[in-house]
Image (spheres, rainbow, N blue to C red):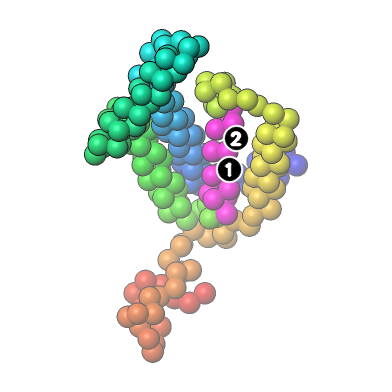
């Protein structure tokens, strides 16, 4: 099985590696945005209840008044809190860069689309690891089983996806029917397979 995996990946081009890297960057982007949202939630919580003990009815009323005041202030704000968080913007830029990398990976003619699309599952696995380790989210046996099933699926796709015999991708493109309704033979973007 190891020889088959090596033969399959040796046939592939740079698209596999680019898709793998792009999906790991995507995971970092999502984790960064999650940290930003957690910071915003923590700030809101500390603003609403700075250190008020809610043991007496008067203190409970003061806490309710603070909640109402914070809700009114949030309603009058025009910009959502996350748009003012630099860490959220960093996550967005990383996410856009990773999606551009994924798009570029699909342009590799030596790597089948099925392989590049299955590399998106790497995002699931790395997100599971990052969220358990750095975001302190609970990790259950069910999550671990799901990750193992995802990995098994990626390996099966990598092993049994046929690679193209040649890398001239223009031979397999369909012409655009909007411009060539009658005769496809003169289409400049490719020929029918």
**Residue extent of the magenta highlight:** 114-129
Q: Quadrant of the N terminus?
A: top right
124 sits to left or right of 40: right
Considering every residue shown, the one lying at the far right of the view is: 1
Mark 1 is surrounded, within 10 Å at the Cα level, by few (under 14), some (14 to 19) or many (20 or more) other residues, namely: some
Considering every residue shown, the one lying at the far front of the view is: 57
Q: Secondary structure at mark 2?
A: helix
Q: Which SS does the magenta portion mostly show?
A: helix
The location of residue 180, given as percent across then percent down, is: 35, 83
Q: Are marks 2 and 1 in contact (CB under 8 Å)?
A: yes
Magenta stretch: includes residue 119: yes
To which residue does mark 2 refer?
A: 125
Q: Residue at x 25, y 35 (%)?
A: 77
Q: Residue at x 58, y 25 (%)?
A: 137
The location of residue 184, given as percent across then percent down, is: 40, 83
Q: Residue at x 55, y 33 (%)?
A: 127
């Amino acid at each position: 099985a190891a020889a088959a995996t090596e033969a399959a990946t040796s046939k592939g081009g740079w698209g596999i590696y680019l898709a793998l890297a792009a999906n790991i960057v995507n995971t970092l982007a999502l984790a960064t945005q999650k940290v930003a949202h957690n910071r915003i939630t923590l700030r809101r919580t500390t603003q609403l209840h700075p250190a008020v003990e809610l043991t007496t009815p008067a203190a409970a009323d003061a806490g309710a008044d603070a909640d109402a005041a914070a809700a009114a202030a949030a309603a009058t704000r025009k910009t959502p809190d996350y748009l003012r968080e630099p860490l959220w913007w960093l996550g967005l830029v990383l996410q856009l860069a990773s999606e551009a990398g994924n798009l570029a990976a699909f342009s590799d003619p030596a790597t089948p689309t099925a392989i590049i699309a299955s590399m998106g599952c790497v995002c699931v696995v790395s997100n599971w690891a990052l969220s358990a380790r750095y975001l302190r989210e609970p990790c259950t046996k069910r999550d671990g089983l799901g990750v193992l099933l995802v990995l098994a699926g990626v390996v099966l796709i990598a092993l049994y996806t046929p690679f193209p015999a040649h890398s001239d991708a223009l031979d397999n493109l369909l012409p655009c029917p909007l411009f060539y309704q009658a005769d496809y033979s003169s289409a400049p973007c490719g020929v029918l397979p």
